[in-house]
Image: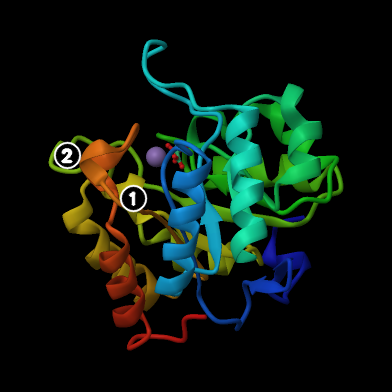
């Protein structure tokens, strides 16, 4: 179902009127790694919007390496994002970690993110496949492109064809970056599938100083969108501060991106 061979036209996904994929403009999604409170997310949503971002990201259920690290605000975080959408109109993107929470996501969320660690959680993929919500499917930490496309098939074969793929870097031998950004996926995914491809330069690099160049390279490579972590005070962030951009730097990435291609 994802194959370009049987579906030559690009899939364009519509999220509350915002179109992603095909020859549409590049979509930039911004927001914190974790939702840290209602005021925080409402304020950041406004900053993302003022900077030119068109969707809000924010994690309420966090897949942390350590069980002792902050695990996310859960339902309270989802409701805080709903409040931020009400105030700004920005659609919300957030990660679903367990099918138990699917009803909550169907009710409140605009785009369901499947995180890298769950790329091959086949029951979770089948569960989101039974909904009609747009899904942002991240590439696994060490998964091949073929495995990633097969995970998209798990969702699509259940009936939900609103899938966008998200490259967030893969594990290699290189420790200077958190992951290695594999930009070759952009032309490969475009050739093999008809699905939109979004790049996450934040998790791919793990370092805010590298986010701008990774973002601009992704735009030049032909990506359909970017998902970037943004925080007012990166050094105080509850997760992923080291890779988060301050709003004014986020705005700068969008400004520079517009010189390369059309960004919404
Ligand atoms: C995230 O988006 O904050 C996240 C945990 O991403 P990934 O699944 O790519 O690590
Ligand atoms: Mn993060």
Q: Nearer the viewer, residue 152 or 21?
A: 21
Label annotation for residue 231: 1
Label annotation for residue 174: 2
Q: Tag 1, which secondary structure?
A: loop
In this view, which residue lies farthest toward the front? Answer: 39
Q: Residue 31, position in %: x, y?
A: 44, 53
Q: Tag 2, which secondary structure?
A: loop
Crowd around label 2: few <14 · some 14–19 · many ≥20 (10 Å): few
Q: Residue 3, position in %: x, y?
A: 69, 60
Residues at marks 2 and 1, CA–CA distance in whole angstroms: 26 Å
Would the CB of label 1 be found within 8 Å of ligand 2? no
Q: Nearer the viewer, residue 211 or 49?
A: 49
Q: How is the model colour-coded?
A: rainbow
Above or below residue 24? Residue 175 is above
Please state the quadrant of the image where ligand 2 appears: top left
Q: Is residue 89 left or right of residue 33?
A: right
Q: Residue 168, position in %: x, y?
A: 40, 48
Q: Earlier in the sequence, mark 2 or mark 1?
A: 2
Q: Is residue 92 left or right of residue 156?
A: left
Q: Is residue 217 left or right of residue 150?
A: left
């Amino acid at each position: 179902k994802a194959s370009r061979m049987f579906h030559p036209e690009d899939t364009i996904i519509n999220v509350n009127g915002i179109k992603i994929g095909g020859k549409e403009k590049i979509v930039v999604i911004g927001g914190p790694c974790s939702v840290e409170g209602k005021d925080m997310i409402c304020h950041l949503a406004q900053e993302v919007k003022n900077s030119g971002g068109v969707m809000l990201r924010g994690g309420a259920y966090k897949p942390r390496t350590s069980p002792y690290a902050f695990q996310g605000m859960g339902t309270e975080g989802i409701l805080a994002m709903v409040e931020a959408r009400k105030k700004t109109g920005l659609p919300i993107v957030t990660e679903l970690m367990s099918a138990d929470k699917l009803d909550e996501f169907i009710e409140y969320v605009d785009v369901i993110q499947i995180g890298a660690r769950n790329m091959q959680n086949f029951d979770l993929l089948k569960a989101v496949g039974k909904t009609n919500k747009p899904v942002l499917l991240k590439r696994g930490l060490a998964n091949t492109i073929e495995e990633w496309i097969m995970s998209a098939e798990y969702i699509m074969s259940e009936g939900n064809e609103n899938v966008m793929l998200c490259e967030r870097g893969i594990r290699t031998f290189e420790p200077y970056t958190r992951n290695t950004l594999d930009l070759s996926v952009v032309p490969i995914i475009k050739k093999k599938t008809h699905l939109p491809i979004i790049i996450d330069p934040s998790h791919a690099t793990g370092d805010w100083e590298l986010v701008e160049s990774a973002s601009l390279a992704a735009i030049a490579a032909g990506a359909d969108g970017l998902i970037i972590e943004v925080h007012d005070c990166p050094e105080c962030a509850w997760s992923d501060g080291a890779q988060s951009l301050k709003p004014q730097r986020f705005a700068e990435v969008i400004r520079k991106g517009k010189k390369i291609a059309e960004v919404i």
